Image (cartoon, rainbow, N blue to C red):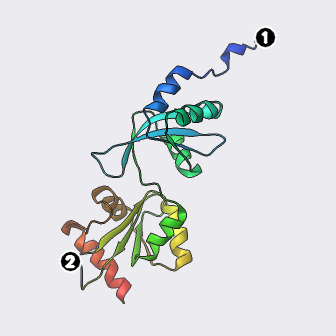
Amino acid sequence: MIEMFSFNTLSYYQPDYKKIRLQVKASDLLITDGTHRIAGIKILTDRKHTAEVTYIGMKIEIPFAKQVAFENGKKIITDSNYSLKLVRDCIVGDTVFYNLKSNKTLENEIKKCDVIISDGKYYAVGLKFDTKKMEAPEIVFLSDYGQTVNEIASKLKIPKNINRPLARELFNNHNQGDEITPLYYSSVAKIYAKLWK
């Protein structure tokens, strides 16, 4: 016997516009790819490079969310990679690394580096060491777009070192502009020793 299922039009997703309005108003900025994904984040002032996810939206919500953002003076950024990361990997209330940069800005920072330490895909840390001015290598930038950083570094012929544990440790325990802490001197010194050969 073949069972017949009736099509229920109420099963379509219906946005909760009141909730969306509140979540967008609680956001400092919205990130979208413009057509399919949109998310909101609130930048946490007590933790560097950290934000809280305040809103995750679907395609149908984009026009309304943008309108609410416009009405409330919220900034909207088009970044397909970051919006995908937020929508795919996060829920409202999660904390995320926040340090949005254009590829041009990232390229300018990579040019200043002696070496890029990366986990190969996600995390990348750029280091510079001037032995006359610094006691230890300095963090030029932190990025969670490791693959993009590796591609730019290859194009610019900046040396790369794939070391997943070290990349993540440096990323999690430093801010941009910091000199690396003594805990990592030995590991980083080995990388520079190879570099200077």
Residue 76, image x and y in percent?
A: 54, 44
Q: On residue 76, which mark appears?
A: none
Q: Secondary structure at mark 2?
A: loop
Front residue of 19 and 66: 66
Q: Is 166 displayed left or right of 105 in the figure?
A: left
Answer whether labels 1 and 2 touch (C-beta < 8 Å): no
Front residue of 44 and 5: 44
Residue 44: name its quadrant. Answer: top left
Residue 67, image x and y in percent?
A: 59, 33
Residue 99: name its quadrant. Answer: bottom left
User: In which quadrant is the C terminus drawn?
Assistant: bottom left
Residue 138, image x and y in percent?
A: 30, 71
Position of residue 109 relative to residue 49, above or below, is below
Position of residue 132 relative to residue 21, above or below, is below
Residue at the (55%, 36%) spot, across then down: 70
The residue pinned by badge 1 equals 4
The residue pinned by badge 2 equals 135
Position of residue 1 relative to residue 81, above or below, is above
Front residue of 150 and 50: 50
Residue 54: name its quadrant. Answer: top left
Counting other residues with Cα less than 10 Å from the Cα at mark 2, is it few (<14), some (14-19), or many (20 or more)?
few
